[in-house]
Amino acid sequence: MTSYHRIHSGNPLRRWAGWAFFVCCALLGMPSRTTRADVRLVSPLPAAPEAGFCDIRLVPEQDKAPSCDVPSLPCGPLLPAKLPAGAQVGADLDGDGRADAMLIKRRSGRPGASYSAIYRSTPQGFVLADYHEMSYAIDPVLPRVVVSLGTGAPIIEDGFDEPLTRGRSLSERRLRRWNGSRFATLLRYCKNRQVLAPGTPARVAGQSVIGIDVDRDGIKEVVVQGYGPPRVFRLGSTDGSISEDKDLTLRYRQSLPAHKKAADLRERAMTMMSKASQLPRAVTLLNRARQLAPQDTGIALALADAVLRMRHGAEAISLLEETKSIDDRSNETDCLMARAYEQTGEREKEKIALQSCISRNPATPLQSQAEGRLRILSG
């Protein structure tokens, strides 16, 4: 590659030829050999899971008590011998120590229907406690225990499987729990989905549920994983609700082998940050770590810091904006964003970022540094 200094040294004819080459390239819209190629320091992340394709829904549902008007499903109490044909006495679904009965049936006619039902075992006999009706073409799933909590009612799972039709299928599950009066739905999630459209790549996704005591408080949390990053949900203490705990989600992700490897790469990179000659290697290691743990904002912020040390403010801005869209809880993000805007010369945006950095980092060195920079800009 021809260097800038070589063009500006030597005889006048060479200097003239060099400048003529630059002018011609500019007029023709062609890149010159002497133009330094743009170096992309931040590697793009793998394609994120398609939003909504195989999702998790925390939509409150008003589960009603089953009606006694359903044909062939008497409300009870019933002796075991009087349960509807096909009923299976098995797991304790409500946590009272007695085995309950489950049932799947199809009702022909117009309109036909498929349904699943639960008969709770009581001292008086089996009583209809839950009924879930769906289309005749859909296969109901027999309720089962998916998370035993040690005490109280377990978390059970039911749902349906849609058979493959015209290249499409969907299996959906509901997580539910007995709350003392009914089986309440906690969340719905896509168990499996596939779309096999002619001429397009196959789209297939699947998820599963496990119970793990992530915070080691003696109570299991619900972990949904498989399609996209795993998520951890904590049960409400008294109201039977469920909600995602982002701190436990992060803790669980960091316990996975890929995240542990990413943490090791980040630690190695941090030892190189103070030496300018080692910054490219640090950036390489942090990019590898980010590929392994794309939801880890700590790795992304470390990468942004390294990119800023190499004076690539525009790339840092793109990275930080993407990081904020994933998780905006870090107090460092706006401080790094202010440094990036300083490098790109966007003074008004830098001021806004500095003010946010100050408000989110009271009584810290970050606050002092941001206040000093803001005084310079305002003076």
Image (cartoon, grey):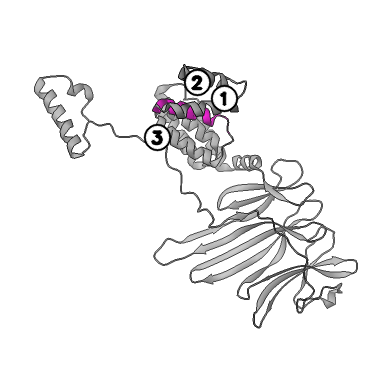
- Pick out the residue farthest to the left: 13
According to the picture, the residue beneath numbered tag 1 turns out to be 358
- Judged left or right of residue 69, residue 19 is left
Q: Residues within 10 Å of mark 3 (few under 14, many from 20)?
A: some
Point out the stretch of residues depicted in magenta: 330-344
Q: Specify the label residue 41 is tagged with.
A: 3
Give the quarter of the figure containing the N terminus: top left
- Judged left or right of residue 50, residue 15 is left
- Pick out the residue farthest to the right: 124
The answer to which of 363 and 151 lies nearer the viewer is: 363
Kindly report the distance in space between the C-alpha atoms of the residues bearing marks 3 and 1: 28 Å
Q: Residues within 10 Å of mark 2 (few under 14, many from 20)?
A: some
Kind of residue sitting beneath label 2: Leu
Q: Quadrant of residue 158?
A: bottom right
Kind of residue sitting beneath label 1: Ile
**Within the magenta stretch, is there residue 33?**
no
The answer to which of 68 and 100 lies nearer the viewer is: 68
Residue 358 percent coordinates (x, y): 57, 24
Residue 96 percent coordinates (x, y): 85, 59
The answer to which of 250 and 179 lies nearer the viewer is: 179
According to the picture, the residue beneath numbered tag 2 turns out to be 374
Q: Indicate the secondary structure of the residue bearing disc 2.
A: helix
Q: Quadrant of residue 315?
A: top left
Q: What residue sits 48% from the left and 27% below the top?
A: 338
- Helix, strand or loop for the magenta stretch, by majority: helix
The earlier-in-sequence mark between 2 and 1 is: 1
Kindly report the distance in space between the C-alpha atoms of the residues bearing marks 2 and 1: 10 Å
Q: Specify the label residue 210 is tagged with.
A: none
The earlier-in-sequence mark between 3 and 2 is: 3
Q: Indicate the secondary structure of the residue bearing disc 3.
A: loop
| Disc 2 to disc 1: CB gap under 8 Å | yes
Kind of residue sitting beneath label 3: Leu
